[in-house]
Structure formats: C-alpha cells, structure tokens
Amino acid sequence: MNTIQLDSFAKINLSLDVLEEREDGYHNIDTIMQLIDLKDVIEIECIDQNECIIECNKQNIPLDHTNLVHKAWEALKKYTGIQQGIKVHIQKNIPVAAGLAGGSSNAAAVIKGLNEILGLNLSKEEMMEIGIGIGADVPYFFMGKTARATGVGNIFEEISPLKTEGVLIVNNGREISSKEVYEDIETSEKSKIGKVVSAIENQDLNALRESAYNTMEKVVFEKYPKIHDIKNRLLSLGADVVLMSGSGATVFAITNTLEKRNEIYEELKEDYPIVFKAKTI
C-alpha cells in the first residue's frame, strides 16, 4: 500500500483560558477541546522523489514548507530517520486561521497516515511527541476524544464528550493570527474550567451557557467588532451556547434542538460566507 486517505476533523474550544506566560515565551492554557464533523480530506501518496508535494482545492493555502503538512513530514523524517517522499492532496473545507485548528488536524493526519502505510509502528504517545514540535494543537488530534488540555495544550485529560447534533459554525472570512491575540491577551490568575467540565459531564446546556468562556474574546472583539456582532446575533436568535473558538474568527453556537439550529442556519446562511451545520463526534 502506497496511498491512504484520511478524514481530518476540526475542533472547537468549549472553553479556553489563557494563564501565565512561561519562561519559554509560550502561555499555559486551560481549555476543553471537542471534535466536530466538519472535516478536510487528506490523501497521501508515496513518491520516489525525497520531497513533499502539496496540492489543495483552495487557492489561499500555502503549498510550500510553511504548510503544517510539510512541517509534519519534516518532523517525522527527523524523528524516525525515514527518507520517503510524499504527495499530499488536501480537500480543504475547514476555514483557515479560524480557531478550528484545520492546519494542525491536517498535520496530525499526515503523521497518522505515514505511520500506517510505512509500518512505522509509532505509538500514540510518540506521535503526540512529534506533533508538539509542529504546533500546540497537533497532539490533540491523536486523541480523537473530548479532552481538557493544560500546559501549552499538550497535557490531556479525557472527559465525557458533549453529545449534540445542534452545532452551527459561523465565520465572516476574517483570518486571525493567534500570535497577535496572545500579544495583547490579559492572562487569568486562576482557571474556572472545572465548572465547564461538570456541565459537559452532566450534558447540561443551561449550566454550560452559564459557565463557558473564552478569555481571547475580549482581545478579538475589540480588534474585530464584527466578530462580536456574530456572537450577539446568534444569542439574539435563541442559541443556547455561543462562544468564539480558539483565537477566532469562528463563532460557534450550540442549540438544544435541531429545529432551532436549522432555523438559525436559514437566518444566517446568506449573510456570512461561512455557515456550517455540524455535530460533535
């Protein structure tokens, strides 16, 4: 076997708190990460040349060494010593620089795919170790579970999944650099994520609405008030939980019923370039 195709799912942050800055320049965080069924499709083919060729259906995706797919290939070569060239086609559906970790998910898919087709027999822990050198969100995608992430996002505690089909993804097309958000962030002294975990474990949307938060919203909403407008509009339309995911610009809504989710979708689908129905997985 020299080709493989994998689904590369997006994530949302059911809450996100940014804590103290570390000596290495990164910040400690406390967040809850949840997979949703919005996905890219990654096709990997082994080739004779010792290079990584990237193709994509979208024009705004870099196809060079700056793409996390390329970084994943380089990191895997360094870790294992393999000298195997690949051609990767990305069927891109996840919005870029949107707080959904599409690039990180793609990188993890490449590592998982090559681990399988080359018979590398890397453990989940080894793949996570490779992933952390590529990007803070990459290790999460080797879990495939709902998880609370601490440290720089590399220490995981599996929690009960939030089971809902009533998810709506809204994005106005603005690409946001997480680095810029971190530069202006006001850090928290103490995380309150524990209350969010309890709400999720009890499948209690009312408690989740009261407890869920994202400390990055303040910075992003001040810089990009139209993203704040999306959140306010979703709330005014009756969504139960509304939050910006990651560093934005995606705002997600969770509704108690599919009927309400679909009603909001119909209201917004012509007003924003990216509006997706989704469910948690």
Image (cartoon, helix red, strand yellow):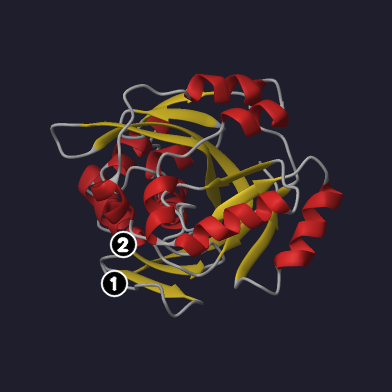
The structure residue drawn at horizontal position 31% and vertical position 24%, both measured from the top left corner, is 189
Residue under pointer 1: 64
Note whether 94 is above or below 89 in the view shown.
above
Residue 96 visible (yes or no)? yes
Compared across the picture, whether 268 is left or right of 63 comes to: right
Residue under pointer 2: 70
State the image quarter where residue 91 is shown.
bottom right
Note whether 242 is above or below 194 in the view shown.
below
Q: How many marks?
A: 2
Residue located farthest toward the left when viewing the structure as drawn: 23
Residue 3 visible (yes or no)? no
At mark 1, the secondary structure is: loop
The structure residue drawn at horizontal position 82% and vertical position 50%, both measured from the top left corner, is 260
The structure residue drawn at horizontal position 56% and vertical position 51%, both measured from the top left corner, is 9
Return the x and y of residue 3 as percentages of the image width and height. Answer: 50, 62
Return the x and y of residue 115 as percentages of the image width and height. Answer: 41, 46
Q: Nearer the viewer, residue 249 or 141?
A: 249
Name the amino acid type tagged 2: His
Asked whether disc 2 touches disc 1, contact meaning CB atoms under 8 Å apart, the reply is yes
Q: Nearer the viewer, residue 26 or 17?
A: 17
Return the x and y of residue 202 as percentages of the image width and height. Answer: 70, 20
Give the mark, 2 or 1, whose residue is nearer the N terminus.
1
The structure residue drawn at horizontal position 78% and vertical position 52%, both measured from the top left corner, is 261
Task: Give how far apart the Cα atoms at labels 2 and 1 are.
Answer: 7 Å
Return the x and y of residue 204 as percentages of the image width and height. Answer: 72, 26
**Label 2 Cα crowd, 10 Å radius (few <14 / some 14-19 / many 20+):** many
Which mark, by number, is residue 113? Answer: none
**Label 1 Cα crowd, 10 Å radius (few <14 / some 14-19 / many 20+):** some
Name the amino acid type tagged 1: Asp
